[in-house]
Image (cartoon, rainbow, N blue to C red):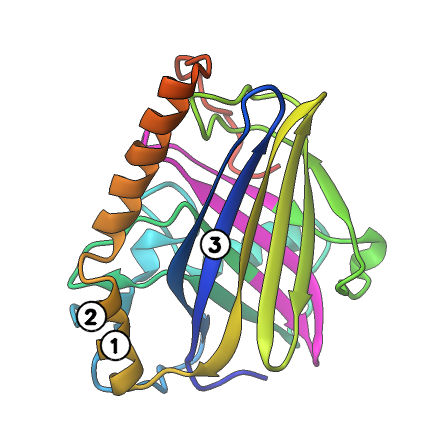
Amino acid sequence: MIRQIEHISGETTHTRRGDIKHGFRYSVDYVLIDAEAPTLGPRLFSRNRFNLASVQDRDHGGLLKKGRGAAWAREVLKAHGLAKDNVQILLLTQPRILGYVFNPVSFWMAVQGSELVAVIAEVSTPFGDRHSYLCHLPGFAPITSSSRITTPKSLHVSPFQEVKGQYEFRFSIQADQIAIRILHTNGAEGVIATLSGPRAPLTNVGLIKAVMRRPVGALRTITLIHWQALRLKLKGARYRTRPTPPKTEVT
């Protein structure tokens, strides 16, 4: 059971497959928190109030900027058959830095004892849309590093990818590190996205170093998204206008 807030100073990669190949790799900072427990973190980190770094419930769980936090995650899990009181809800996300945040994807993790039994991948886009993907095995069996969980793609994320095909999720949540792989397949095209890094206690020193490495936080994320979009356009990738987002919150 996690109580202390953890820091994942890792990297994310994206690799585009198909006729127009493209890829990039960036460093990134995530935090892993117990979404329902009192904060046990350093002075420079807060829950639901301004600080150098913070995680706020309104940023997660439900509509974009109108989140309900862990209560929403519990409702989703209960609606799909997981309503056990001994399930701990963790949130893996990029924190707000000086009040600003943009998370392309965050992960709600349902943990029973020491076993991961479900994940809600919460995807947000620069277009102001959000959709979540519930990942679990039959009967909510433990998810291991060898598990493969598939779900249809439902949300327009990139103007250079169709809302077709499916996602394959892989989660390796170890005591010392985290590795997540998301494969989007649509015929011969697709994208492989990864997030990985070591787990360590979140400290004031670690936060200061992270901000010094990436001083503009989420603004950097938005800038890099537009930079990679420009590179793809210059390579000749077809631009697709944003379709109507899905009416449901969860696939």
Where's the C terminus, which quadrant? top right
Horizontal side of 62 relative to 188 (left or right) equals left
Is residue 191 at least partly visible in the picture?
A: yes
Q: Marks 2 and 1: CB-CB under 8 Å? A: yes
Point out the tag, 1 or 3, that comes first from the N-terminus: 3
Q: Amino acid at mark 2?
A: Met
Q: Nearer the viewer, residue 47 or 236?
A: 236
Q: Residue at x 73, y 41 (%)?
A: 150
SS of the residue under disc 1: helix
The Cα atoms of the two marked residues, 2 and 3, are separated by 19 Å
Give residue 231's position: percent from left, percent from top: 36, 27
Alpha-carbon neighbours of circle 2 within 10 Å: few (<14), some, or many (≥20)? few
Residue 32 falls within the magenta-colored stretch:
no
Residue contact at pointers 1 and 3, CB within 8 angstroms: no
* Residue that badge 1 annotates: 209
| Residue appearing at x 46%, y 12% in the figure | 238
4 left or right of 224 in image:
right
- Label 1 is placed on what type of residue? Lys
Give SS at disc 3: strand
Give the x, y percent position of residue 32. 46, 71
* Residue 12: assigned label: 3
The range drawn in magenta is 109-133
Q: Was residue 111 drawn as part of the magenta stretch in this picture? A: yes
Which image quarter: residue 110? bottom right
Residue 212 - label: 2
